[in-house]
Amino acid sequence: MLQIGLYYKKEQTMQNRYVQITFALMVILQLTIPLKMIFDSENIIKNGDVHYLECMPVDPSDPFRGRYIDLRYKAENQAYKFDNWKQYSRGDILYASMAQNGDYSEIVQIFTHAPQGSYVKIKVASKSSNGLYIDIPLDRYYMEENAAIASDTLLRFRREGKNLDIYAKTRTKDGEIMLEEVFVNSIPVGAYITREIQNLEVK
Amino acid sequence: MSNRIDIDELLENGIISAEVAGDIHHYYDNKKSNRSSSLLLVIFGVLGAILIGSGVMLILAHNWGQLPKLLKTVLAFIPLISGQLLCAYTLKRKADNIAWRESTAIFLALAIGACIALISQIYHIEGEMHSFLLTWMLLALPIVYLMRSSVTSIFYIVGTFYYATFSYTSKEPLGRFLIYLLTMLFIFPFYYNLIRSKINRNLTSIHHYFVPFSLIAGTVLVFLEGGHYASIGIISLFGIFYMIGHYLQATNHLSLFKNGYLIIGAIGTIGMLMFFSFEWFFDYHSKEIYKVDGEYRYAILAASGLFVAAVIGLFAVRKVGSYYEMPALFGFLVFSLLFLFGKSVPGISQLVINILIMMMGVMTVKRGIDYDHLGILNYGLLIITVLMICRFFDVELSFIIRGMLFIAVGIAFFATNRFILQKRTNHAE
């Protein structure tokens, strides 16, 4: 029977040339994947177009999952129509061209192929008679331990009628979108929450 | 143990002296205790590696928010690079030490996932869970072969199975399932070598459970959308597992509870036959017109492939088969033929299935008696009992007859168990 693998050939230690080469290739591959992720992200952050997306108030659905804030965008709250939109369904990939309108950016048009200019690759979230609802692939802002506090605080402020201007600073390049920061009233969300907690403690 | 029987025989016939016989016994006793102690070392080594890795991550997580991005990025690579250095050291200095190999290998495998997950968090990168899993498992695969790590192999099998579960909700379930099958194929050479070289190791036995479970669950998930022909594919797969288990038992003397293929194959086959033994199934089957277009074609193709593979398997195991196994081995074939050609005679089809199950139960009882195995004996009686209970639901029987049947089976339980125990007592005397 054919002996498959490195098992029965030469001694399987670092003295074996095949083991050395294979080990080196494995290390290179294991390091390449995360390094590529970093390189691609940094490339978008440095060279991508800036878009400020208005966020809808957060609603933490899982009280035990305090590692990130759920993000929803105003652009995801409206239905979109275009030629042959009815043939698309949940999970289908489309392309949304974006342009600035006032303080924030908005989705101008949905395309079935990558258009010219600044655009984002999106997915269809759901379909109704009004059109397609889309999902922008930036659902989480990781905040580790403060995320649960942040979510609860922002939600409570909204219920109390406090004026909250929540928006995300993003970068787009070749259809990919990166999240740089989430702001509340022009202050980074982490700093805003820390300040509000301190204010509450003082009171 | 067969070695001890041979040693005693050699001693009796004056081939070896008492002193040599004692040395041989002493050698095998040490080997057994070394195996148990090295297994303990492996278990504790792996646990230690996981705890250390988790502890480091928790400490970092506490102050994570305050760290600058560059430092976070560097820290994310530390577990990965540490794992790679540890594995390199193990291969250089501790290549024959199983505990070192297993613990450093699983540490590195976990560190790969931790690194990718941390980078995703630092850069707020959205990703699909199934892509993350596939990437992680494929990056961990070389560790299995380089470090000869059974624990990492089991981890890989679990990870690829988790990937397969996403095929059910995917828009292209068949494509994702085929990728899953390919990932299972990648681990096959290691698994094959494991069987060939270390048939009785506990980690090998764990593979014998994880591999068939993963394959059957992954297949069921993708078949759920495939229509009723999927039942042929699934019962054929259980049949294939039973044949593999039967072959392993006959040729490698694998003990019953270490033979995951035999147990999963037997229980799966019996379970499916019990399900199809009900009146409602063949009534429904005789009236239903099954779709064969669209995505059902793939399910039919896959089911046909599995059926053909199982039939080929029958030819392969026929020489090592005993007549006890015949009903179980042919279970998938009987059901598939009834499913395809028994539509117009649902009553007869149901009767044949019930007779087949009864035969499996009786043959198992007889095997238990002949092999002096209480577990097999009672398993056979359990099959008959469950069959009887199932028939109570769809066959009109008076309470008296039901009562008498229960009493009969109860007496059979007592009588057969007592018979075996009596036989053992007589032998001992």
Image (cartoon, coloured by chain):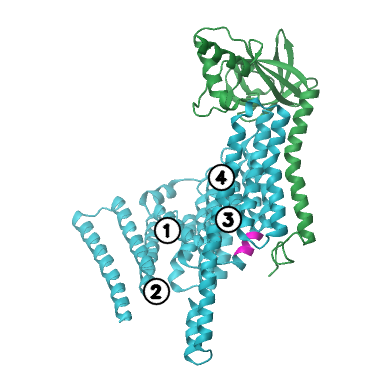
For label 2, the SS is loop
Q: Position of residue A67 (x, y in %)?
A: 57, 28
The mark lying in front, picked from 3 and 4, is: 4
Q: Which mark is residue B304?
A: 3
Q: Is residue B17 visible?
A: yes
Sequence-wise, the earlier of marks 3 and 4 is: 4
Between the residue at mark 3 and the residue at mark 4, the CA separation in whole angstroms equals 47 Å
Callout 2 amino acid: Tyr
Sequence-wise, the earlier of marks 1 and 3 is: 1
What chain is tagged by disc 3? B
Between the residue at mark 1 and the residue at mark 2, the CA separation in whole angstroms equals 21 Å
Residue indicated by mark 1: B270
Whether discs 3 and 2 lie on one chain: the answer is yes
Q: Assess whether mark 2 and mark 3 are in contact (beta carbons under 8 angstroms).
A: no
Q: Position of residue A119 (x, y in %)?
A: 75, 22
Q: Quadrant of residue A101?
A: top right
Whether discs 1 and 3 lie on one chain: the answer is yes
Between the residue at mark 3 and the residue at mark 2, the CA separation in whole angstroms equals 36 Å
Residue indicated by mark 4: B51
Q: In the rendered view, does B124 fall on the left or right side of B200? A: right
For label 4, the SS is helix
